[in-house]
Image (cartoon, rainbow, N blue to C red):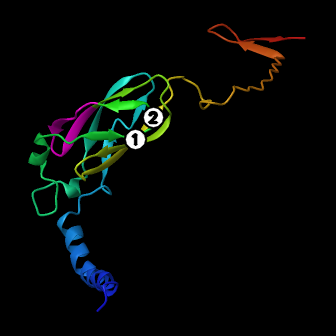
Amino acid sequence: MSWFGRPLMLISIAMLLSPLVLPACAIADPIGKTVSWTANPGSVVQGKTSEVILSAPGATCGTASGQLNDTSLATPPTIHVQAGFDVSASTPNHSGTCELTVTLVVANAAKTGPLRLTIMGDLGYATITVTSSQASPIPDGLAPQVWMSWDIRVSTITMGDVLPTTTTRLR
């Protein structure tokens, strides 16, 4: 067999063995980046520092094979914040059964919208919303435009008390 035939033979052997190897990895570690943790509260505000509790789904928390063992969170994993939002996360604390508490520092000019927090060690992710610090029904980046029309017409005023009712007609 020539030298050029050997890499092809190795590749074909790897392709034959890959169906045997990959499912074993998937079964051994069902907890992964596809596990969505719950964030409470579900939103943070620009310019504020907030404590957020991240909770693993109940079905993935336990001591059975392939589940997240709560004792493994005694040494908290690192929380990575999605880039481009100007939000930073502190080292989380193990705060309850399959729960982590993390402090998020949100800058004044932080981008608003859904933010993904990745829990390292292939434990999963949580999504939290960064909201604007401006109390306004108008979304950030849009100029306020208000069309207002007032039209008040009062033709009759009726007043009543314990005394007889009086009606006055306005002209």
94 w.r.t. 5: above or below: above
Q: Secondary structure at mark 1?
A: loop
Residue 158 has which mark? none
Occupied quadrant, residue 15: bottom left
Residue 98 is one of the magenta-drawn residues: yes
Image quadrant where one finds the N terminus: bottom left
Q: Residue furthest front?
A: 2
Circle 2 crowding by C-alpha within 10 Å: few under 14, some 14–19, many from 20: some
Residue range highlighted in magenta: 90-102
The residue to which callout 2 is attached is 85
Residue closest to the eye, 8 or 15: 8
List the residue tagged with mark 1: 82
Residue 37 lies in the magenta stretch: no
Whole-percent x, y for residue 131 in the image: 48, 31
Q: Residue at x 22, y 35 (%)?
A: 92
Against 101, residue 159 (above or below) is: above
